[in-house]
Image: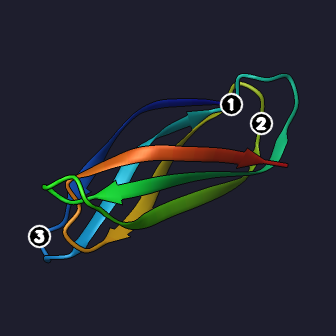
Amino acid sequence: MHVGPYRVERDVKPGRNKVVGTLSNVGHARVRTAKVSFRLFDANGRAVGRASDEVHNLKPGQTWKFHAFARGNVSRARLLKVETN
């Protein structure tokens, strides 16, 4: 699995943001479930929560665009982990 570039997108409604980016299956087998998880930070660098998204049946060579919804005043995100099975 490969996580491409990701960023925090702010919604027009305060407190409704999301972490968007891509996850690619660079292996040779189908992945039944893949989950990306992020730690969220405010403008002062304080951790303010987590966000995650998951996809099912990601085929070899396939790329998925994730949208991990992030509540609160989120300025940046850091990838915590990618889980697969």
Rendered view: 4 above or below 34: above
Name the secondary structure under disc 3. Answer: loop
Q: Name the residue under label 3.
A: 12
Q: Which labelled disc corresponds to residue 59?
A: 2
Choose between 62 and 11: the one closer to the eye: 11
Which is nearer the eye, 68 or 78?
Answer: 78
Q: Is residue 35 above or below residue 60?
A: below
Determine which of the numbered discs, if any, sits on residue 1 in the image.
Answer: 1
Quarter the N terminus occupies: top right
Image spot of residue 4 (x, y percent): 47, 29
The residue that appears at 64% across and 44% down in the rendered structure is 82
| Residue 22 place in picture, x, y as percent | 49, 37
Which one is in front, 43 or 21? 43
Whole-angstrom CA distance, mark 1 to mark 3, is 32 Å
Which tag is nearer the camera, tag 2 or tag 3? Answer: 3
Residue at 14 percent of width and 55 percent of height: 44
Q: Is residue 55 left or right of residue 3?
A: right
Nearer the N terminus, badge 1 or badge 3?
1
Q: How far apart are marks 2 and 3 (CA)?
A: 34 Å
